[in-house]
Structure formats: C-alpha cells, structure tokens
Image (cartoon, rainbow, N blue to C red):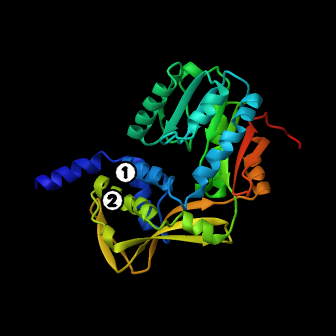
C-alpha cells in the first residue's frame, strides 16, 4: 500500500506536458515521443558525456569554428548586447562567445532546472562581473525575458545543431518564437550540422561505448520513475538510422521481444521489432540552412565552417518583415 502511495505521489508531480506527450506518443502508430524529454538530470549528464566521444564530431568541430570566428561575431554584433542562450545545458561553448562579445548580461534558458542552475553558477563564477539571469523554460515557445534585459539589444546563441532535432515546420516555428522572444534587430548565432557520408553520421549517434544507447534508454527509465511506468527497459535496444530521403539521423527504441507494461495504470503492448521514435537529427546543405533561417524570420549575414565542411556556424539578424523580396 505504501509503495503504491509513493508511486502515486511521484506521478502527481510529473510535468503535465511530459505526461501528455508520453501517453499520446504511446497511443500513436508509429509510436513517438519528443526528444526534449531526454533531458532530465541523468539525460543531461549523459549528453555531456556524448559530446566528448571520439565518434561525436559536432561538438569539437563547432567549438573550433567558434574559436576562429568569435572575434568576427563580436565585431558584427557590437558590444553591450545581452547574450541569450537557448537550451544552454552545461554551457561548455558559451565562454568562447562571452569572452569575445563583452555582453551586458547572459540569459541561459533550459528545460532542466537543476542542470541550468549549476551551469549558471559556474559561469557566474568564471565571469564575476557579468549579470547571469537563468530562465527555466521550454524555449519552443516565445519567452518573456527578465526585465533587466527588456530594453537591451539581444544576441541569441543556439549551438549544437539542436535545430536539427525538429522537423522543418517545427524548426521554422522555433525560429519565429526566438525572433519574438529576442525582438527585431536581434542577432542569432546558430550551429547547423551538414550532410555527410552515412557511416560517419551513424557512428556519431551509435558510439562503441554505448553512451548514446544509455541516453536513449534513459527516457524509458524517466517514464517509469515519473509516470509510475512498468516498462521493461532491458527488453529495448537503441537504434540509429540514416534516413536519406529526409536527410536525418533517426533514433529509435526497439522492443527486442513482445512486451506488456503500464504507464500510470494504462496498459500498453509492443510487438518484437516495434519501435518508439525518440529523436531526429536533420542535416542541412548550405542553401537549405539559409532557406530555413529566412522562413523563420532571420536573415543570414555571415557563415563560418571547418575545412572539411562538416559543420557550419551562421550569424543571422531579425530584420523587419518585408512585403516584397
């Protein structure tokens, strides 16, 4: 009886949007759950481990590009802007930008509150004269930024090719929400991963050490913990697949045998080989990236890439809407 009361109490504290997305995702066919729910504390820590893996090129490639172009970004953006980082995570690339642009304030935004507060405290310590204003929020929607930066010109920061996790129309919606949050005249530094050979891409999302697999499977562990689930996690496996038609890596959780389980008392079954689609990572050609930004209300004004063209960092501006080209 006590165990059930504890489980009921845990379920009642779950994020209502998480509950809705999970139950809707398991009802759907094919099954799918939005990737944003990877990032509880354990998921955030596992992702930071992923960024250090030898197969995972995006982080080290983008970091090197940022080191090379940060001073150019600072020149183009001008001093005194408030840097607003969307999905800040551990903010490992952020110091490169902050050192170059001399911002008036730093506003990190993340859905994982504990992780956000820890990383914000670390940055505040590293930059003692900088005002740090963390915001715990879902950046997929327009956000009311702290009053301290309401009238300050903004420089958005969205590294890591996180834009690739969304299907194109959701990416456009996000870019429009960012423009609304930051305001006209704002600038945005955004990372976008490039299309490349499938072997390199699949290895980056299915590493030899199994860290990405643990990251993917942690979603089921979170469902069990927060939604009183009984999913047999050990009976699922991680899969990463290159979908050439849609230019994206897809991550799935595949049932290795017929399984039955409950989520908040609701029964579900999955047949062996059936999957839960948990993440997309779209890759963009140079022209595709510019079209996407313009569709979201941002005008690209500069672009930097590595020597092999694996990854791009783009600076764009939120210009006034025009009725004609």
- Report whether residue 161 is seen: no
Element class at badge 1: helix
- Report whether residue 202 is seen: yes
Query: Can you give x and y, in whole percent of width and height, for residue 207 in the image?
Result: 49, 65
* Residue 60 placement, left or right of 238: right
Tell me the residue at 72%/44% (across/down).
314
Query: Mark 2 or mark 1: which comes first in sequence?
Result: 1
* Residue 2 placement, left or right of 66: left
Residue 286 figure quarter: bottom right
Counting labels gives 2
Query: Can you give x and y, in whole percent of width and height, for residue 316 in the image?
Result: 74, 39
For disc 1, the neighbor class at 10 Å (few under 14, some 14 to 19, many from 20) is some
Query: Can you give x and y, in whole percent of width and height, for residue 32 in the image?
Result: 48, 64
Which numbered circle lies on residue 221?
A: 2
Element class at badge 2: helix
User: In this picture, is 293 found above or below 232?
Assistant: above
Quadrant in the picture for the N terminus: bottom left
Tell me the residue at 64%/71% (across/down).
198
Q: Nearer the viewer, residue 285 or 175?
A: 285
Which numbered circle lies on residue 42?
A: 1
Tell me the residue at 77%/31% (across/down).
76
Q: Nearer the viewer, residue 269 or 167?
A: 167
Residue reaching furthest left?
1
């Amino acid at each position: 009886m006590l165990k059930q009361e504890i489980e009921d109490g845990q379920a009642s504290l779950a994020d209502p949007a998480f509950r809705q997305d999970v139950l809707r995702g398991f009802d759907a066919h094919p099954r799918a759950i939005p990737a944003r729910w990877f990032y509880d504390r354990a998921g955030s820590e596992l992702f930071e481990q992923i960024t250090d893996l030898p197969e995972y090129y995006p982080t080290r490639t983008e970091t090197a590009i940022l080191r090379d172009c940060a001073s150019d970004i600072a020149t183009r953006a001008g001093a005194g802007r408030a840097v607003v980082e969307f999905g800040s995570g551990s903010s490992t690339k952020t110091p490169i930008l902050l050192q170059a642009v001399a911002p008036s304030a730093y506003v990190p935004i993340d859905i994982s509150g504990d992780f956000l507060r820890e990383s914000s405290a670390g940055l505040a310590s590293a930059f003692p004269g900088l005002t740090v204003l963390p915001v715990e929020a879902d950046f997929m929607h327009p956000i009311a930024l702290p009053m301290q930066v309401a009238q300050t010109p903004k420089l958005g920061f969205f590294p890591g090719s996180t834009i690739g996790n969304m299907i194109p129309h959701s990416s456009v919606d996000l870019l429009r929400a960012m423009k609304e949050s930051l305001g006209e005249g704002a600038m945005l530094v955004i990372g976008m991963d490039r299309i490349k050979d499938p072997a390199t891409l699949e290895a980056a999302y299915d590493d030899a050490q199994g860290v990405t697999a643990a990251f993917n499977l942690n979603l089921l562990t979170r469902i069990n913990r927060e939604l009183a689930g009984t999913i047999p996690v050990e009976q699922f496996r991680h899969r990463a697949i290159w979908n050439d038609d849609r230019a994206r890596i897809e991550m799935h959780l595949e049932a290795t045998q017929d399984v039955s389980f409950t989520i908040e008392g609701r029964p579900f079954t999955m047949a062996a080989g059936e999957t839960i689609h948990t993440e997309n990572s779209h890759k963009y050609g140079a022209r595709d990236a510019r079209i996407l930004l313009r569709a979201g209300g941002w005008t690209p004004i500069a672009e930097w890439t590595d020597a092999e063209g694996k990854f791009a960092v783009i600076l764009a501006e939120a210009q006034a809407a025009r009725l004609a080209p």
